[in-house]
Amino acid sequence: MVARKKTFWNRYGIGTKEQKVVDLIQEGACVIDVREYLEFKRGHAAGTINVPMSDIISYIGQVRDMGSKFAIVCCHDGSRARIATEIFNDFGIFSINVGSWQNASRFLDLAKKDNLEI
């Protein structure tokens, strides 16, 4: 199994942090886009959940109730995701900032590809 993982990561050219993000998604981490609703509606990665930054505190309970101890966080360029990650971590939700929603889309796609090869 370890050899398959190594082959997969070498083929797609992603490093250790990226591998951890994909692994967390496969283990059920929720992927959260903290852009405002209208930004999210204009385009987002399939499978992401919109938690607007302007209302993030009121969503903490719902994020906890999603059943995952981990959150992968994105936004337009990573700046709001950085702040959201700090907030989630302060509330005991381990979070990783992946930057833009396009990056999140890439990680979600890689997680699907890896699952297909099992």
Image: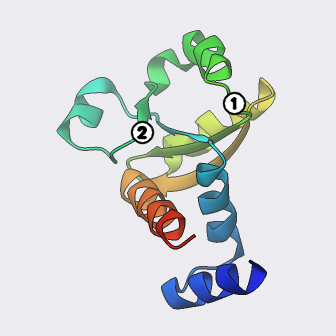
Neighbour tally class for label 2: few under 14, some 14-19, many 20 plus, Cα within 10 Å: many
Where in the figure is residue 5, as x and y percent of width and height?
67, 79
Where in the figure is residue 26, as x and y percent of width and height?
60, 53
Tell me the quarter of the picture where residue 58 sits. top right
Relative to 4, residue 62 above or below: above
Which residue occupies 18% across, 38% down? 42
Relative to 7, residue 5 above or below: above
Where in the figure is residue 49, as x and y percent of width and height?
43, 31
Neighbour tally class for label 1: few under 14, some 14-19, many 20 plus, Cα within 10 Å: many
Which residue occupies 46% across, 25% down? 51
Which residue occupies 23% across, 28% down? 38
Nearer to the camera, 91 or 62: 62
Where in the figure is residue 104, as x and y percent of width and height?
45, 54
Position of 62 with respect to 6 (left or right) is left
* Residue that numbered label 2 is attached to: 48
Q: Residue furthest front?
A: 118
Position of 68 with respect to 53 (left or right) is right
For label 1, the SS is: helix
For label 2, the SS is: loop
The amino acid marked with disc number 1 is Phe
The amino acid marked with disc number 2 is Thr
Relative to 67, residue 29 above or below: below
The quarter in which the N terminus is drawn is bottom right
Q: Which mark is residue 38?
A: none
Figure label count: 2
Relative to 9, residue 88 above or below: above
Q: Which mark is residue 88?
A: 1
The quarter in which the C terminus is drawn is bottom right
Q: Nearer the viewer, mark 2 or mark 1?
A: 2
Which residue occupies 45% across, 69% down? 113
Nearer to the camera, 88 or 47: 47
Q: Residue furthest left?
A: 42
